[in-house]
């Protein structure tokens, strides 16, 4: 029986609107309804919670709490990134949901670059990002799951190829995994022409696809699932949706 992995940037439950002047009400329940139709064994989520000017972070995280209520057959972990008092009012926070129990939770801070930019008339600093990691047992086999959300340098006129620090930390972690089956999922915020996919390939992790766009705002392949050699890639597809500005990546694997 294949193991199904999903990665999805849920944009803090903000549905998509083709009208840029409209801002639909948050609908976390709608995100859950979409995810429930994918029959996933493991779900990696990015932008789970809402970001606020000033960097406020609500505890316990309300969206993750609601997700747990509506998905009682999944175990889960969640983490906010480090606080940023010049935070943008967009989504933040990572979660992993699994049908099997999750253990060995750890998180790694991915420090922000030193760039500054202006948004809504204010000087801003990029936020630190995050890599979270857990282990689980699926079909009698141990699996390591990593989830991340990297900085979108292209949004501030830069490139992750010129500011690879976050990518390099993730790569260094991938290189420590060795022969253990592992998945890396997330919103990599990689613009066309950037070398993130080839960088992680050199670390032993292949992308299930790098051709079909996953972001509604620009035709970019932002969202990825990477896997290493102890896993056999079976199939993948992009599940399109209007519950976020991202589509979901769905991939099936078997243990070698």
Image (tube, grey):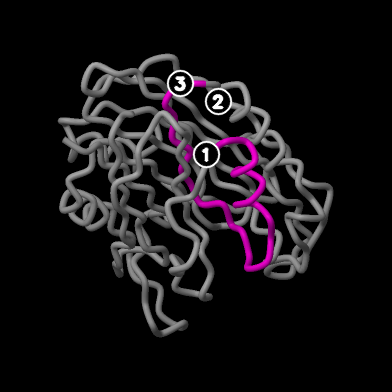
Residue 158: quadrant of the picture? bottom right
Q: Secondary structure at mark 1?
A: loop
Give how far across and how far down residue 219 sits, in percent: 51, 75
User: What range is drawn magenta here?
Assistant: 179-204
* Residue marked by disc 2: 107
Residue sitting at the far front:
256
> Magenta span has 183?
yes
Q: Identify residue for label 3.
A: 180
Q: Are marks 1 and 3 in contact (CB under 8 Å)?
A: no
Above or below, 14 relative to 54 = below
Query: What's the mark number on residue 57?
Result: 1
Q: Which of the pair 72/132 is nearer the observer?
A: 132
Q: Is 106 displayed left or right of 30 in the figure?
A: right
Q: CA distance from mark 1 to mark 3?
A: 35 Å
- Mark 1 or mark 3: name the one nearer the start of the chain: 1
In primary-sequence order, the first of circles 2 and 1 is 1
The local secondary structure at tag 3 comes to loop
Q: Residue at x 41, y 28 (%)?
A: 230
Label ID, residue 251: none
Q: Residue at x 29, y 36 (%)?
A: 42
Is residue 227 found inside the magenta-colored segment of the image? Answer: no
Question: In the picture, residue 81 is in which quadrant?
Answer: top right
Q: CA distance from mark 3 to mark 2?
A: 19 Å
Nearer the observer: mark 2 or 1; the answer is: 2
Q: Residues within 10 Å of mark 3 (few under 14, many from 20)?
A: some
Asked if the residue under mark 2 is in contact with the one under mark 3, i.e. CB atoms within 8 Å, the reply is no
């Amino acid at each position: 029986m294949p193991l199904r992995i999903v990665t999805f940037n849920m944009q803090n439950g903000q549905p998509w609107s083709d009208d840029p002047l409209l801002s639909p009400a948050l609908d976390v329940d709608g995100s859950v309804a979409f995810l429930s139709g994918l029959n996933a064994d493991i779900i990696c989520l990015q932008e789970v919670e809402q970001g606020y000017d000033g960097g406020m972070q609500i505890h316990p995280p309300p969206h993750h709490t609601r997700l747990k209520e509506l998905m009682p057959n999944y175990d889960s972990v969640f983490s906010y990134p480090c606080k940023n008092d010049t935070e943008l009012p967009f989504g933040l926070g990572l979660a992993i949901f699994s049908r099997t129990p999750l253990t060995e939770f750890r998180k790694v801070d991915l420090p922000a670059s030193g760039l500054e930019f202006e948004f809504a008339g204010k000087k801003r600093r990029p936020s630190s990002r995050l890599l979270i990691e857990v282990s689980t047992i699926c079909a009698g086999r141990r699996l390591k799951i990593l989830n991340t959300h990297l900085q979108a340098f292209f949004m501030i006129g830069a490139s992750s190829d010129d500011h690879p620090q976050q990518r390099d930390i993730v790569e260094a972690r991938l290189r420590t995994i060795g022969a253990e089956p592992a998945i890396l999922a997330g919103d990599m915020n990689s613009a066309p022409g950037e070398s993130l996919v080839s960088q992680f390939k050199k670390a032993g992790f292949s992308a299930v696809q790098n051709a079909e766009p996953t972001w509604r705002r620009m035709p970019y392949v932002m969202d990825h699932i990477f896997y290493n050699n102890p896993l056999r890639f079976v199939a993948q597809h992009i599940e399109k949706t209007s519950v976020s500005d991202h589509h979901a990546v769905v991939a099936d694997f078997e243990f070698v």
